[in-house]
Image (tube, rainbow, N blue to C red):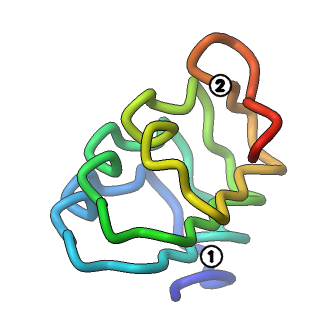
Amino acid sequence: MVNRNKLSGKIPPELGNLGNLRSMDLSDNQLEGNIPVSFGNLKSLKFLWLQNNKLTGSIPKEVIDLHLPVFNVSGNHIHGADGNIPMKF
């Protein structure tokens, strides 16, 4: 967990290479840009917290297809793949 550490800049797409990762908490930082498409490679991921950053763009379909039980992107400027965040999130 690296939440609340005043991290800034873009989320490194290389984090998508951490295939055995089960949870990721990048919340309450100053991260900007898009959610990396490479996060779709995180097949073991169950919890993804990205809330309260400065993220923009859409949620990659690859991330939506993970069907994460916990996925929080509130407090950003992003939208779902089709312009709407599905209700299950």
Whether residue 17 sits left or right of residue 10 in the image: it is left
What residue do we see at 68% from left, 46% from top? 54
**Residue at the extreme bottom of the image, as rendered:** 1
Crowd rating for badge 2 (residues with CA inside 10 Å; few <14, some 14–19, many 20+): some
Helix, strand or loop status at disc 2: loop
Q: In this figure, what is the number of numbered marks?
A: 2
Q: Please tell me which residue lies in front, 48 or 8.
A: 48
Whether residue 17 sits left or right of residue 59 in the image: it is left
Q: Whole-percent x and y of residue 89?
A: 75, 47
What residue do we see at 57% from left, 25% from top? 58
Helix, strand or loop status at disc 1: loop
What residue do we see at 44% from left, 27% from top? 61
Crowd rating for badge 1 (residues with CA inside 10 Å; few <14, some 14–19, many 20+): few
Mark toward the start of the polypeptide (1 vs 2): 1
The part of the image, by quadrant, that contains residue 37 is: top left
Measured along the vertical axis of the image, is residue 81 above or below residue 54? above
Amino acid beneath label 1: Lys
For discs 1 and 2, the disc positioned in front in the rendered view: 2
Whether residue 9 sits left or right of residue 12 in the image: it is right
- Residue tagged by mark 2? 80
- In space, the residues marked 1 and 2 are separated at their CA atoms by 26 Å
**Residue at the extreme top of the image, as rendered:** 82
Amino acid beneath label 2: Gly
Q: Please tell me which residue lies in front, 49 or 65.
A: 65
Measured along the vertical axis of the image, is residue 81 above or below residue 21? above
Specify the label residue 37 is tagged with.
none
Q: Please tell me which residue lies in front, 37 or 30.
A: 37
- Residue tagged by mark 1? 6
Q: Whole-percent x and y of residue 46?
A: 50, 70
Q: Whole-percent x and y of residue 36?
A: 36, 43
Measured along the vertical axis of the image, is residue 10 above or below residue 57? below
What residue do we see at 42% from left, 50% from top? 10
